[in-house]
Image: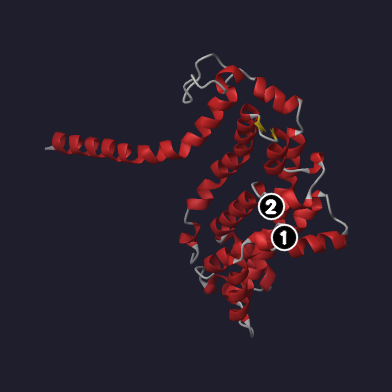
Amino acid sequence: MVKMLGKKKTLWNIARYFGILPFVIYSLFPFYWMLITSLKKNSELYSLASIPFWIQKGITLEHYVYLFEKSSFLTWFGNTLLVSILSTLISVSISILAAYALARLRFRGAELFGAGIFAVYLMPSTLLFLPLSKVISTLGLSDTIWSLVLTYPSFMIPFSTWMLMAYFRTIPREIEECAMIDGCTRIQAIVRVVLPVAIPGVVTATLFSFLLSWHEFIYALTFISSSLKKTLSVGVVAELVRGDVFFWGSLMAGALLASVPIVIVFIFLMDYYISGLTAGAIK
């Protein structure tokens, strides 16, 4: 009987893994395609007789050498990292205060403000860059990375605020009321009591905000014209696509390297993202 149950459990585990396998392949295939394309020689890459799904004529690093030595990839990478970090910090900091106020405090027009944030969140960011370009020009920030740091929060704050509003509403009011009875101010209660409990929500908002700023294209294309001030999403496309000539090997190498920081961030923060830290909120 025990052996039969063991066999059934083993078969069930095998069936479950086979059921997950197509989704894993679907998710990893783009990374596999970028990797093998970036390691192929040009003679194989542009040959119609070659098999596109694996490497036949040996591995080469010439596309990575071209990327680092004959383009400004490292500069674009640094610009993207700086813009993403600063805009994410600004957006999440403002969103925490806004979401807490809308979720906890009672004041006239709170529901209207919440609906307004939701409406702005639904508005495509491509409709906002026209008026924002006038603002950037007036402030004298055209063709600077600070134009992106200033404009990215315009679509990141509504998204993060709406997400955090829903999360703050799941946290019992009693924990912060007890802290305020013990002598904490409202700000101290937020920092010492609410935020530690809300770490999964804050991490989620941070992840999505960082992801939005990392791969944003329209604003970076509109506000930045100098090659050395571009971000990855614009620089790689603008410099490695010349007319009808596509440097596919270097393009795939740049795309693969640009995806590494996002993967690393998700690896280190995924535990907070999926964990239920609110289980101990009442305690």
Compared with 131, 241 (above or below) is: above
Residue at the far top: name it.
57
Compared with 173, 272 (above or below) is: above
Label 2 SS: helix
What kind of residue is marked 1? Phe
Query: Residue 131: where, in percent of width, then height?
Result: 75, 65
Marks 1 and 2 sit apart, C-alpha to C-alpha, by 8 Å
How packed mark 2 is, by other alpha carbons closer than 10 Å (few <14, some 14-19, many 20 or more), is few
Q: Residue at x 57, y 68 (%)?
A: 165
Tell me, for residue 218, which label it has, or none. 2
Quadrant where the N terminus lies? top left
Label 1 SS: helix
Query: Residue 224: where, in percent of width, then height?
Result: 79, 48
Query: Residue 95: where, in percent of width, then height?
Result: 65, 64
Q: Is residue 190 left or right of residue 141?
A: left
Q: Residue at x 65, y 31 (%)?
A: 246
Q: Is residue 25 left or right of residue 128?
A: left
Tell me, for residue 129, which label it has, or none. 1
Q: Is residue 116 left or right of residue 56?
A: right
What kind of residue is marked 2? Ile
